[in-house]
């Protein structure tokens, strides 16, 4: 997987469009014109046409929640329009306070439009836009562990997806990650990889700024606690939660190459293997 490990050359910062043809607020990038999605109509088009066909229902928040998040400023959405239709989108969540952790919540291309370079261009442009706007300490993304999730026609191939992120500079945090449940009764998504798409210089604990091997744990710990609490309504005292929070309780957290996942503990592995199911629910 040599080519997947190549870091993309940094692009110039995105600029607001002067071209009246792209409309106010558009962000011009080579190959992809990004547009902030803020109206309920645009967010509904994104949710219905792009996100719903791309993610299993347990991984996708409701349209109402997406609109509420974008209205309150906790969430921001960027879209790509082709022939008047929104064909791709990226959604991130975060406080917007410089130094805080941001999370890429969704990145998706409408079925039928994939494999043509829109996803890669959108990812690069979205990361640069959010870093320029909010100066996050870390910009993270959740990616299915390819050894624990099956490929499917509807939702794609986890190995291809991880290669995609790796090509765009993602590194994997050495934590046993799972996606918190949506709401108190929502199922957690096991065996996800928590990856970095951007590490600010002040978040680097070890290694060079452009290729860190560890990040400062504190902001990550605060983010994970807030994410679990916000999603699930409480900080549950179960083995999986303890393992995840325990992995960020020291001063630093290791960052590894996505091609070498051996040193990354797998969150809720029991749930994907169908073994020892009771181990994860001892609260
Ligand atoms: C993953 C995704 C965003 C990539 O966008 P894209 O426009 O298809 O990607 P690009 O054309 O820029 O790059 C192609 C690469 O994307 C990846 N990719 C393409 N189709 C894919 C699919 N169905 N599933 C997973 N990854 C895919 C592959 O790595 C591919 O390169 P490779 O075949 O050489 O390995 C898009 O396929 C998608 O929306 N998938 C469903 C939703 C999803 O998985 N989102 C990411 C998780 S948040």
Image (cartoon, rainbow, N blue to C red):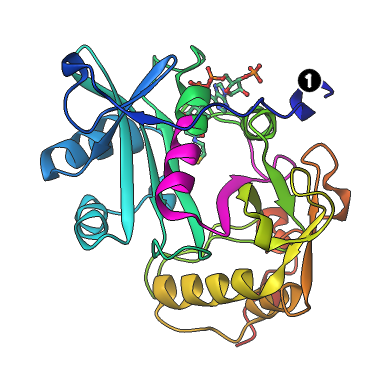
Measured along the vertical axis of the image, is residue 75 above or below residue 223? above
Residue under the image location 72 percent in, 55 percent down: 273
Q: Nearer the viewer, residue 90 or 98?
A: 98
Q: Can you tell me which quadrant of the image ligand 1 is in?
A: top right
Residue under the image location 45 percent in, 84 percent down: 234
Left or right: 89, with 219 as reference point: left
Q: Quadrant of the N terminus?
A: top right
Measured along the vertical axis of the image, is residue 46 above or below residue 28? below
Q: Quadrant of the C terminus?
A: bottom right
Q: Does 139 lie within the magenta span?
A: yes
Indicate the position of residue 224 as horizontal and vertical percent values: 56, 71
Which region shows up in magenta?
A: 125-150
Q: Quadrant of residue 229?
A: bottom left
Residue under the image location 62 percent in, 54 percent down: 200
Residue under the image location 61 percent in, 58 percent down: 190
Q: Nearer the viewer, residue 194 or 250?
A: 250
Measured along the vertical axis of the image, is residue 42 above or below residue 205? above
Q: Nearer the viewer, residue 175 or 127?
A: 127
The residue that mark 1 highlights is 3
Left or right: 116, with 213 as reference point: left
């Amino acid at each position: 997987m040599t080519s997947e490990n190549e870091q993309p050359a940094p692009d110039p910062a995105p600029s607001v469009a002067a071209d009246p043809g792209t409309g106010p607020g558009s962000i011009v990038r080579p190959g992809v014109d990004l547009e902030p999605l803020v109206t309920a109509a645009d967010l509904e088009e994104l949710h219905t046409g792009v996100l719903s066909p791309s993610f299993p229902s347990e991984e996708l928040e409701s349209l109402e929640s997406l609109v509420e998040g974008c209205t309150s400023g906790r969430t921001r959405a960027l879209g790509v329009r082709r022939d008047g239709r929104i064909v791709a989108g990226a959604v991130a969540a975060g406080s917007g306070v410089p130094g805080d952790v941001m999370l890429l919540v969704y990145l998706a291309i409408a079925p039928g439009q994939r494999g043509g370079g829109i996803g890669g261009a959108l990812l690069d442009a979205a990361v640069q836009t959010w870093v320029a706007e909010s100066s996050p300490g870390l910009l993270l993304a959740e990616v299915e562990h390819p050894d624990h999730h099956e490929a499917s026609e509807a939702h794609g191939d986890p190995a291809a997806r991880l290669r995609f992120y790796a090509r765009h500079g993602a590194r994997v945090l050495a934590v046993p990650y799972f996606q918190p449940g949506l709401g108190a009764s929502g199922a957690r998504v096991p065996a996800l990889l928590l990856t970095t798409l951007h590490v600010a210089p002040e978040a680097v604990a070890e290694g060079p700024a452009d290729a860190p091997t560890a990040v400062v744990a504190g902001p990550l710990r605060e983010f994970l606690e807030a994410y679990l609490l916000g999603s699930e309504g409480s900080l549950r005292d179960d083995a999986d939660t303890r393992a995840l929070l325990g992995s960020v309780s020291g001063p630093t957290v290791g960052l590894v190459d996505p091609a070498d996942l051996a040193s990354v503990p797998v969150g809720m592995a029991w749930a994907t293997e169908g073994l020892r199911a009771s181990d994860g629910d001892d609260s």
